[in-house]
Image (cartoon, rainbow, N blue to C red):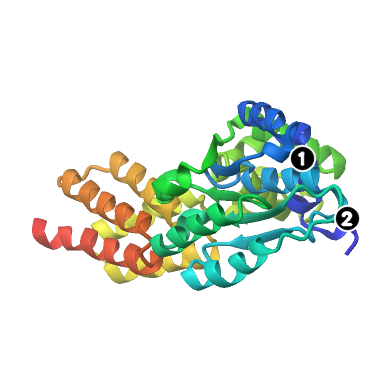
Amino acid sequence: MPVEDLMWVEKYRPMALVDLVDQATVKHRLELLIQKKAQLPHLLFAGPPGSGKTTMAMIIARQLLGERWRDYTLSLNASDERGIDTVRQRIKTFARFADRAEGIPFRLVVLDEADETTSDAQTALRRIMEENSEHTRFILICNYSSGIIEPLQSRCAIFRFQRYDEASVTEHLKSIAKKEKLKHGGDAVFGAIFEATQGDLRQAINLMQAASASGELSIEAVKSASGASAKSRVSEIIRTAMDGNFDMARTKMIELTRVYGIPERDFLRFANEALGSMNVPDLGKAVSILAEYDFRLVQGSQPELQLTAMLAQLASLKGQRD
């Protein structure tokens, strides 16, 4: 497929460290490590969605492995392949091969959303990392490092990515708009995109592309493409649950997580913010409920089931008040 036909988030994905938006501290530390690639440790990238973690992993693969980086890199999304069988079969099989072409220092395993893997799978992964460290390196990517067991964390150099601020997002969006020769309504339009995506650069680029389908980017088009922001949608769901309407809250939650793809941990974060802005008489109980289900998700529980149970408990508070 010609590059002009790709999604903009892929078309303009950085190919080198210098091109990655912001994250100066992370880039500086990695530049020093890459200079001595044979001594590169396993890496753990932690930070919010859309902050450049996966892009950084791909940049490292290209810089370390050259033109054949795809042949010597195994990329998996742990939220889809989270069980111990994947670790033992796919990852172990790939990692144990010691064959390398000239100039290839090691094989590379990139495990995205690693905090979604089960504790058993992480324990098995620890052993594989230990047994194959001579000829395989691992890059673990997660939203929350607390979801990674301590023995894995201790075997990695940890890099913490920050959520992008409005200035960084706006500058990058303007750069893409200029390359696409896109007509737009000025800074207010990019501000509206940032407000809808809250520092998630990947989501911001996708929203800008969707909103500019007509060839012109306007605030009205941004609002239409985004509907309500994920943050406001979560607030509506929590308000619905707190009003005692569990069925409606559950339906809206499933739509938001399945159709719009909001991560479950982001759902909880926005839910906590929503509770803080609401006049809730039993706020302490409600926040305790969120904390309990946040812990369950960290432990690897089934996300949709846990969020459904959480909404049920929030809805039950209405009956207790009545």
Q: Secondary structure at mark 2?
A: helix
Rounded to the nearest whole Å, what is the CA distance between mark 1 and mark 2?
Answer: 20 Å
The amino acid marked with disc number 1 is: His
Number of other residues with Cα within 10 Å of mark 2, as a class: few under 14, some 14 to 19, many 20 or more: few
Task: Pinpoint residue 271: horizontal percent, then vertical percent.
Answer: 35, 49
Q: Mark 1 near mark 2, Cβ–Cβ under 8 Å? A: no
Task: Report the side of 143 relative to 222 (left or right).
Answer: left
Residue positioned 73% across, 43% down in the render: 60
The label shown at residue 265 is none
Q: Which quadrant, please, contains the C terminus? A: bottom left
- Residue 24 to residue 237: above or below: above
* Outermost residue, right side: 2
Q: Which residue is mark 2?
A: 4
Q: Which residue corresponds to mark 1?
A: 184
Q: Kindly identify the amino acid type of the residue bearing the numbered disc 2.
A: Glu
Q: Give the answer, above or below, for where 33 lies relative to 295.
A: above
Going from N to C along the chain, the mark reached first, 1 or 2, is 2
Residue 14: image x %, image y %? 77, 42
